Image: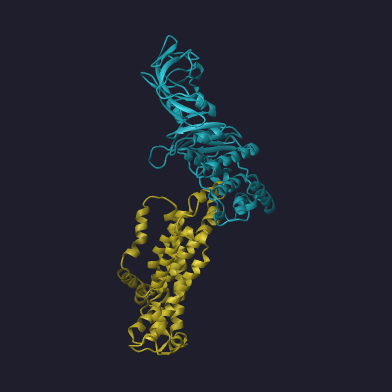
Chain colours: A cyan, B yellow
């Protein structure tokens, strides 16, 4: 079973540059899989290396299982890391690669043998024990790298974009493998990725990081339903932002007065709605619009609905056929409108 | 096999021919008994050149032995110095690295004749002039920069992430170096050592200046033979001089497995 990971106000700066990581606080429950998500260069790999002990935080504290590990060298943290590249040791066979961590711990030879075999079986690479790494494909190498990290039964499993170099099919397969290993082993896992979809599929919770700062830390669904800021919403594919001002309990916008489910906050507000939540019907919060573009995506059709003042995006099932130029009535259900923080 | 492969094969053949052709007259001369002007090939053959090489009192065996000892010692010492230097330059980032690299390269940039004059004066004072250890030491001047540079390239590829992976798996810095970094760079170390050996093997000027004629190596014999007028002896010596170099290179390419060889030239497959 994995250990609890706590990062408290962790900052890191390389040389005199702007901090790569600023005041990051993160709690990861034992056995939880957390995705550190963000665009490349946002500091998420830095965060992972700080946890692994490969980088020393400029300030802040990192605790594993309740104990601070800031002064502990990486080899004594039991935080195994899998990198973007497999980084198998080229002069060792697959089996010796996987057994490396056990050897460093002085595990007896027979025990190492059976554990290595078991680890290779878990990643479905049992037939490759004697092979040199160079004979393996990229995906196979990365599976071996996973086995090599898991075999030591680390208290933390740190994955740094481990599948970003693989092609789409393989990536999907690897995600399933990680989920399965996670369920079986109950490792506390921190997973770095820039792929929003990957984070949603894998993670119990997502920590979204921009410019070294934590933007939002919550369950995947929350990033769609209740994004904290406009930037967060936009990162998760939101395109509809409606500016307005609260008046008499509803929000006055270019689309008319919109009613929200809860009480509307006073003053200027920005509302957002997922394109797939837009309805083509009359009723509360409805307005007239003209279809200005349509793009067919197979399972969905994306439409741009234009009114006199603004444009809104709607994603509708393909059986609703609208042509460019059609006049439609669209409705924004109160329950799907979300108020963003300024 | 595409068209491109066949074309590169043809290029290889041409390059090999250009390298090998100058050796043809050398081999012919070395075994010639009589070869006068208008004749295309020697009219008589002899083993006079070969027997000169192995003649007990001829001094060739002794000179070859000196060259071998100095070359091996130079190679070993160059690697011993170049390994940590190469690791520091290639594997890590630090302040003033450019300045240090410049100083390491200086012996290549400064004409050896200029610096060796100063070295000579110092060596006379230290009693190292005209001795074999002195010649060995002065051979390090051109070899250390090269070994350091070669090894820097090797380490640039091998340190960093591989070591980090080893560390998170439980290896101490020393274990990571011994079990991961060092085995990975060994083929590169072999090549660097070989290179140092060949540089030393080919030294003439430095050996002459510091050895003062007391330390006789193969190039010294070859040089004096070349200024005489016995092309048979000169060619035999030239062959004896070139052969070990060719042999060691062929051997090195065979010993280094293809997978390891790519790591010396460029990144392996990911």
* Residue A18 drawn above or below residue B211: above
Residue B216 seen in this snapshot: no
- Residue A258, quarter of the rendered image: top left
Percent from the top left, x then y, of residue A135? Answer: 56, 55
Does residue A241 sit above or below A248 in this rendering? below
- What is the residue that sits farthest to the top in this orientation? A248
Please tell me which residue is depicted at 49% across the width and 66% down the height of the picture. Answer: B253
- Residue situated in front as seen by the camera: B64 or A224: A224
Q: Nearer the viewer, residue A14 or B18?
A: B18
Q: Horizontally, is A125 left or right of B126 in the view?
A: right
Instruction: List x then y, in percent, for residue B200.
Output: 41, 71
Q: Nearer the viewer, residue A260 or B64?
A: A260
Residue B16 seen by the camera: yes
Quadrant the C terminus of chain A occupies: top left
* Point 55% across, 31% down: residue: A205
x and y percent of residue A279 in the render?
49, 19
Total tally of numbered discs in the picture: 0
Q: Quadrant of residue A290?
A: top left
Q: Nearer the viewer, residue A168 or A208?
A: A168
Q: Is residue A106 left or right of residue B47?
A: right
Residue B198 position within the rendered picture, expressed as x and y whole percent measured from the top left? 43, 71
Quarter the N terminus of chain A occupies: top right
Determine whether A105 is above or below A264 in the image. below
């Amino acid at each position: 079973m994995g250990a609890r990971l706590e990062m408290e106000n962790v900052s890191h700066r390389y040389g005199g540059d702007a901090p790569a990581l600023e005041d990051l606080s993160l709690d990861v429950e034992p056995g939880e899989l957390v995705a550190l998500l963000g665009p490349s260069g946002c500091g998420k790999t830095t965060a992972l290396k700080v946890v692994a002990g490969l980088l020393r935080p400029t300030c802040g504290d990192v605790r594993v299982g309740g104990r601070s590990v800031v002064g502990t060298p990486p080899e004594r943290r039991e935080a195994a890391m899998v990198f973007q590249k497999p980084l198998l040791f080229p002069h060792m066979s697959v089996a010796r690669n996987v057994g490396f961590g056990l050897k460093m711990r002085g595990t007896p030879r027979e025990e190492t043998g059976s554990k290595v075999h078991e680890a290779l079986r878990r990643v479905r690479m049992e037939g490759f024990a004697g092979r040199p790494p160079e004979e393996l494909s990229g995906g196979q190498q990365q599976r071996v790298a996973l086995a090599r990290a898991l075999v030591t039964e680390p208290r933390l499993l740190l994955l740094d974009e481990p599948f970003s170099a693989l092609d789409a099919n393989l990536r999907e397969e690897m995600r399933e493998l990680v989920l399965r290993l996670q369920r079986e082993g109950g490792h506390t896992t921190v997973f770095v990725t820039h792929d929003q979809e990957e984070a949603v599929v894998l993670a119990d919770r997502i920590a979204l990081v921009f410019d070294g700062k934590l933007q939002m830390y919550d369950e995947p669904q929350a990033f769609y339903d209740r994004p904290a800021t406009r930037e967060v919403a936009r990162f998760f594919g939101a395109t509809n932002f409606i500016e307005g001002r609260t008046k008499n309990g509803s929000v006055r916008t270019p689309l008319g007065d919109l009613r929200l489910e809860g009480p509307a906050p006073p003053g200027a507000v920005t509302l957002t709605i997922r394109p797939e939540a837009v309805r083509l019907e009359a009723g509360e919060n409805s307005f007239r619009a003209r279809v200005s573009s349509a793009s067919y995506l197979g399972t969905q059709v994306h439409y741009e609905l234009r009114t006199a003042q603004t444009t809104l995006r709607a994603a509708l099932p393909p059986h609703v056929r609208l042509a460019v130029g059609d006049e439609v009535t669209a409705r924004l259900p109160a329950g799907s409108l979300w108020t963003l923080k300024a | 096999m595409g068209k491109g492969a066949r074309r590169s094969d043809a290029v290889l053949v041409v390059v090999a021919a250009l390298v090998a052709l100058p050796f043809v007259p050398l081999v012919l001369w070395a075994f010639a008994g009589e070869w006068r002007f208008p004749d295309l090939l020697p009219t008589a053959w002899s083993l006079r050149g070969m027997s000169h090489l192995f003649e007990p009192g001829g001094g060739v065996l002794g000179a070859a032995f000196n060259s071998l000892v100095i070359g091996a010692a130079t190679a070993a010492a160059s690697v011993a110095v170049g390994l940590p230097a190469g690791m520091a330059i290639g594997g890590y980032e630090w302040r003033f690295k450019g300045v240090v690299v410049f100083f390491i390269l200086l012996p290549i940039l400064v004409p050896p004749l200029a610096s060796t004059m100063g070295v000579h004066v110092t060596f006379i004072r230290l009693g190292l002039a005209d001795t074999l250890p002195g010649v060995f030491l002065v051979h390090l001047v051109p070899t250390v920069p090269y070994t350091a540079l070669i090894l820097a390239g090797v380490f640039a590829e091998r340190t960093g992430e591989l070591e980090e992976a080893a560390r998170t798996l439980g290896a101490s810095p020393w274990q990571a170096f011994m079990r991961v970094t060092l085995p990975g760079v060994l083929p590169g170390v072999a090549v660097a050592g070989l290179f140092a050996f060949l540089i030393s093997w080919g030294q003439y000027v430095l050996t002459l200046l510091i050895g003062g004629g007391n330390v006789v190596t193969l190039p010294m014999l070859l040089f004096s033979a070349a200024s005489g007028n016995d092309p048979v002896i000169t060619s035999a010596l030239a062959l004896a001089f070139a052969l070990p170099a060719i042999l060691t290179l062929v051997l090195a390419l065979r010993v280094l497995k293809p997978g390891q060889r790519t790591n010396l030239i460029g990144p392996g497959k990911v």
